[in-house]
Amino acid sequence: MTDLTSLTLAGARERLRKKDITALELADAHIAAVEGARALNAYVLETPDQAREMAKASDAKLAAGEGRPLEGIPLGIKDLFATKGVRTTACSKILGDFVPTYESTITAQLWRDGAVMLGKLNNDEFAMGSSNETSHFGPVSSPWRRKGANTPLVPGGSSGGSASAVAAHLCLGATATDTGGSIRQPAAFTGTVGIKPTYGRCSRWGVVAFASSLDQAGPIARDVRDAAILMRAMSGYDPKDSTSADVPVPDFEAALGQSVKGMKIGIPKEYRLDGIAPEIDTLWQQGAAWLKAAGAELVEVSLPHTKYALPAYYIVAPAEASSNLARYDGVRYGLRIPGGDVSDMYQRTRADGFGAEVRRRVMIGTYVLSAGYYDAYYLQAQKVRTLIKRDFERCFAQGINAILTPATPSAAFGIGEKGGADPIEMYLNDVFTVTVNMAGLPGIAVPAGLSAEGLPLGLQLIGRPFDEETLFSLGAVIEDAAGHFTPEKWW
């Protein structure tokens, strides 16, 4: 049965359609894999009974010749997505055993297309983190290890459970969210493919909010084709989300294999940071060479406000978080710690319910929004954000089709190695990814090679608004040249 977990999503779809395998066999193989990989801590809740029921329903549909686009495909769901009747906690103590009475739009669309839920995946608490170490359920381990070492490594964050589960073959794909790099950075760390769609492409309704003007959901999958298949199911206009864009959803999978000849690829000089790891720089040059060999034209471009992106992001995101997280007060749902009066109950509940990183960001956000500092910090950061967006618009106006950059400044690091004494050290992991969220653009991370220690390294492609198709076609070129990377099983 284990060979069923090594199938790609597209491969499993084909075998299900041909009736070589049943959806129940596929679900059982993945349920067994999940049970055997608890050392990774990728899942915070397993739903095997529900998975088998959904798989049986898929088998009935397939037998009747009524198979839907994702019929019988087993997926993992990040614990930020509300799932009706299934515990959803955002991996925070403050939500306790919260069980939603509603379904997020994105998961509803996946079930509409016949997908099967294996369970809820671990993530940084309220998606605040770059390593999946802030979860109330403990850190996630990457299925990757450095050559000749047993140090447990982070899978990246905040969608670390999603990336770890996909890389370890514990699901055929996973939902994820990206506020400042939380799809692309874990994908790069684990040798998987992750795409952060254009802001508004996928509904945010029913997804626990971190920073509403930055958050965007997307898939993490084993390869570019699988990501394209999932992206189609996850996309679409939703009247319940006021930021959802009413634009047509193309067949993203059809973009694979399209010629990239004549496309102009921007290479931003500002991304050549001081102290960038030589192997990251070499990988970047290699990626550019692969695209050139496929017929694309390389053009040096300038994004002058890039250097301000990280500080501006760490003002805007905490400000929005402090506003969004005000609703967790111990009154309506989740944790409640009794106090002498209502104010005391609020303080005790929030102090006990939020982890250290969430408390830090709420306090930063409250500070930058306070009367004396709003103009000096938040307003300034929003102005910088406009300038960052304008930089990209100028590039695209010059005929640039996409921009190629590294995805991360390094390969994955060990659990506990970063950010202990200095949280800014952890925040720097997002240096290549936050600009995309600030500008609302689509970005894809594709595996492009291995580090000297045998760990995955990824490249990022940034596209024009609502032009994810170009990213898929360019990503497929890099994937074809680089090949696929799978960790050796140790768990």
Image (tube, grey):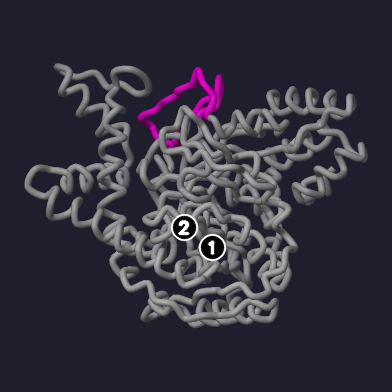
Query: Element under label 2?
Result: loop
Above or below, 285 relative to 308? below
- Magenta span: predominant SS is loop
Residue 167 shown left or right of residue 5 in the figure: left
Q: Position of residue 370 (x, y in %)?
A: 12, 43
Query: Element under label 1?
Result: loop
View extreme (left): residue: 372
Snapshot quadrant of residue 52: top right
Q: Which mark is residue 67?
A: none
CB-based contact (under 8 Å), mark 1 and mark 2: yes
> What range of the chain is rendered magenta?
82-104
Q: Nearer the viewer, residue 30 or 372?
A: 372
Q: Which mark is residue 151?
A: 1
Q: Amino acid at mark 1?
A: Thr
Snapshot quadrant of residue 149: bottom right
**Label 2 crowding class (10 Å Cα cut-off): few <14, some 14-19, many 20+?**
some
**Label 1 crowding class (10 Å Cα cut-off): few <14, some 14-19, many 20+?**
some
